[in-house]
Amino acid sequence: MKAMILSLLLLGAAPPGAAPSSLPPEALGAPPLVDASPTAWACTIDTLRAGKECVFEAELPPPGAPNASVENANIQLLKDASRALCSEAISHARDGVADPKLVAVCEGKYATVVGRCGLEGNTSVVDKKGRFSPEARACYRALSSVLQDVQLMASVASSCCECAARSRCPGDGEACYADVSRQQAGPNTLACLDERCRDACSMMLPPSASIPRPPPSRVSPDTGSAAL
């Protein structure tokens, strides 16, 4: 014990001239070394697909003057990626079952976002290893938001809206996916879905008794035609 105390005292009385920089890099008292290399948390297409949190740490030269070819390359890259992301997300949410109409809706939403992701050609949207640049942060968030919306539509509205299209219910197509997933369908649409697509739409429909019904048409006794 005395030897241990003596050694600690000797360490605490190190000569003032011993600067930390004289210590080897592996020593505990050495100055910290910053590792600026990219980590496994970098934002990529894979993290976008999986909805994971990530870090924008691409290795790119400083932004330069606007360049049309760089802007076009950024947009084309993300357009190509959106096709795969839309198909994969919808198929996965539906246990391998495709929905071509929803894929088209997804690609349309991506096209709107991607058109704003050229970064004015100042820098590439991703580096050579596919990592999103810090300047593409808003673009990445917008792409992620579209993907989350489409995954929700695929999970809760896809089968219902397929039935709505076959049954010629009002408000079909893209409006159906948005309205059904947010439970915002109008009375006429709800009545049609309840009558013709109850099995496919049961998850998103209120009880039948609570759905407002349009008044029945009246037949004129003189003409035999429906009176409005």
Image: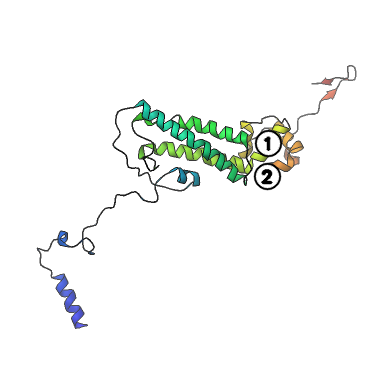
Q: Is residue 117 visible?
A: no
Image coordinates for residue 67, horizontal then vertical, percent: 34, 27
Image coordinates for residue 64, horizontal then vertical, percent: 29, 31
What residue type is disc 2 on? Met
- Residue visible at 47% across and 43% down? 48
Q: Are there few (<14), some (14-19), or many (20+) residues within 10 Å of tag 2?
A: few
Mark seen at residue 203? 2
Screen quadrant of the N terminus: bottom left
Q: Nearer the viewer, residue 14 or 70?
A: 70
- 225 left or right of 111? right
- 114 left or right of 228? left
- 181 left or right of 55? right
What residue type is disc 1 on? Glu
- Residue reaching furthest to the front: 128
Cα distance between the residues tagged 1 and 2: 14 Å
- Residue visible at 38% across and 31% down? 119
Name the secondary structure under disc 1: helix
Mark seen at residue 162? 1
Q: Are there few (<14), some (14-19), or many (20+) residues within 10 Å of tag 1?
A: many
- Residue visible at 68% across and 45% down? 203
